[in-house]
Image (cartoon, grey):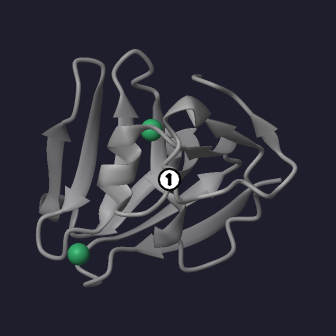
Amino acid sequence: MSQTIKGSCMCQGIQFEYTGTPDRFSYCHCKMCQKFSGGAFGAFITLKRKDLHYIKGEELRKEYSSSEWASRVFCSICGSSLEYIYHEMPEDVSISAGLFDEDPKIRASRHIFVKDKCKWFEITDKIEQIARY
Ligand SMILES: [Zn+2]
Ligand SMILES: [Zn+2]
């Protein structure tokens, strides 16, 4: 099922859309995703980089190398958490689910890095839980 879903950062400086079907939707509880999101976990929808199109503000993307294996991209104006990039899979990109302005028509299927989950958050849904990845 192909679709076009739009998204944006908090200041609207960056606007994007994707076409196609996302690969997966994961809640990541690793420490870096807690920091990146500012919340209990990162909610990421993974799609093909070729299906992601920046309509506006691509130059506002700021990339931070968060580890040897991954980078994070955020808006340099408002700080919204935008992308997770795993260097071993450059054809994929994971977008923070909260940036979509329309229903992405996919629901989270798993919690990952549950071993690092913050103490004050309890998982109460029934989807799969994976200790690491
Ligand atoms: Zn912004
Ligand atoms: Zn993570």
> Image point 68% across, 65% down: which residue?
104
Compared across the picture, whether 70 is left or right of 75 comes to right
Compared across the picture, whether 29 is left or right of 54 comes to right
- The extreme right residue here reads 126
Answer yes or no: is residue 118 visible. Answer: yes
Is the residue marked 1 within 8 Å of ligand 2, measured from its CB? yes
Pick the front one: 83 or 123: 123
Q: Residues within 10 Å of mark 1 (few under 14, many from 20)?
A: many
Compared across the picture, whether 6 is left or right of 75 comes to right
Q: Residue 109 at x, y = what percent?
A: 77, 45
Q: Quadrant of residue 93?
A: top left
Answer yes or no: is residue 84 visible. Answer: no
Query: Mark 1: which amino acid?
Result: Phe
> Image point 54% across, 58% down: which residue?
18
Name the element at disc 1. loop
71 in relation to 104, above or below: above
Pick the front one: 103 or 36: 36
Give the quadrant of the C terminus.
top right
83 in relation to 54, above or below: above
Pick the front one: 70 or 33: 33
Residue located beneath label 1 in the image: 41
Ligand 2 quarter of the rendering:
top left
> Image point 50% across, 53% down: which residue?
41
> Image point 57% across, 42% down: which residue?
47
- The extreme bottom residue here reads 11
Count the labels in the image: 1
73 in relation to 58, above or below: above
Q: Residue 28 at x, y = what percent?
A: 54, 42
Q: Residue 113 at x, y = what percent?
A: 55, 31
